[in-house]
Each structure stands twice: as structure tokens, then as C-alpha cells.
Image (spheres, helix red, strand yellow):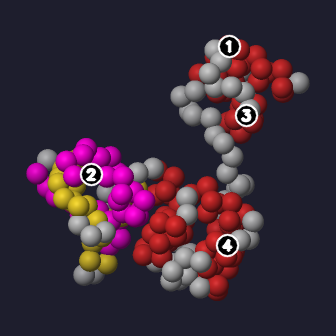
Amino acid sequence: MIAKISGTVSEKLATSIIVDVMGVGYEVFLTPRAYETITPEENVNLYIAEQIKEDEHTLYGFIHLDERQMYFQLNSVSGVGPKAAMAILSHHKVDDIQEGIMADNITLFSNVSGIGKKTAQRIILELKGKLVEAPEKKSAPDDPAYLALLSLGYNAKDATKALEGIDTNLETNERVKQALKGAK
């Protein structure tokens, strides 16, 4: 399975791009939002979702890993195929999709072309149990203050919560001190 492609954009087609990887051109379909940000001759790193059928082998590309993961979750819902999953991701950001699922927002999905009310309800029903909680602002895994809290015994969720609202421009030790003060 292809999970990631890194190469140079050799051509932009109507809804896809051709990525040259050491002389081999891969056609990759993108959401309109991603398509607009990419220019010919640009070096790209795309996360890939493959769709393999008897007569077709299609690659869908995503700039961010969370988009790829959401694509797989949407595609796992009965009645939601690759094109419908891409349509949803074309209209909404991953955070908005997660929030819509957690809030039972049928309209968020049914406003997307090709997604009816029943399919929207099915998406919410089937994915609500798979999503642990609504998304929250996450600290970067390479954030020194976040890593310091983890080394002090915090779990990832508590470390993220402790750092919420603390100015990221402060020195690391000051951010950790404020996070610890807020935890008491």
C-alpha cells in the first residue's frame, strides 16, 4: 500500500496532479483546497489513500495526515465511497467534521453535494463511537513544554490541557511553571 509520495509536480490536470517520483509519474486526486495551493514544478509530500478496484487504481492525496485519517473514517461508513469522502473533505476542515459528528450536525454533511439526509445520519451514527471526543487544540509533539510535562508524568491529554491558554512565545521553563500552577 502506498502511504506517502514525495516528488515534483510535473503537471496539473483538471482535478488531479501528476507527481514525478524519480521518473515515474503518479496521478493523484486532491481536494480543491489542496489543488489550489500546489503549483507545477513544486516539490510536494502527500499522504496517500489508495482505492483499488478490478479496473481502476486511484490515488487520493492529502497535505495533512489528519485529512487522510478522516478520509478513511468517512470511507468506512456504509454508502460513503471515495468520491463522497473527498467531497466532504473538500467542503469542510477535519476539525469541523469532527465537531459536526459530535454535535449531531446533519446539515453539515447533507449540504455537501451527493450526501443526503440519510447518509449524513449514517455518518454521524457510525463515526460518533469512533471519535473519542471533540477536537481540542493540541500541543505539538515537539513542543518542549509539552514534552517536559510528559516527562513529569502527565498523560498527553492532561499536558495539552495544562498548556491551553499559555502564551507560546514565553520561555519553555515559564510555560511549564504556569502549566504546573494551573494544575493545582
Where does the magenta region start and end? 23-52
Upstream in sequence: badge 4 or badge 3: 4
Instruction: Classify the position of the N terminus by image quarter.
Output: bottom left
Instruction: Point out the frontmost of discs 2 and 3.
Output: 2
State how far apart marks 4 and 3 are (Cα).
Answer: 28 Å
Residue picked out by circle 4: 124
Residue picked out by circle 3: 164
Instruction: Classify the position of the C terminus by image quarter.
Output: top right
Q: Secondary structure at mark 2?
A: loop
Residue picked out by circle 1: 173
| Amino acid at pointer 1 | Asn
Q: Marks 1 and 2: in contact by CB < 8 Å?
A: no
| Amino acid at pointer 4 | Ile
Indicate whether 176 appears above or below 8.
above
Image side of residue 59 versus residue 134, left or right: left
Quadrant position of residue 101? bottom right
Magenta stretch: residue 169 in it? no
Disc 4 packing (10 Å; few <14; some 14–19; many ≥20): many
Disc sitting over residue 39 in the figure: 2
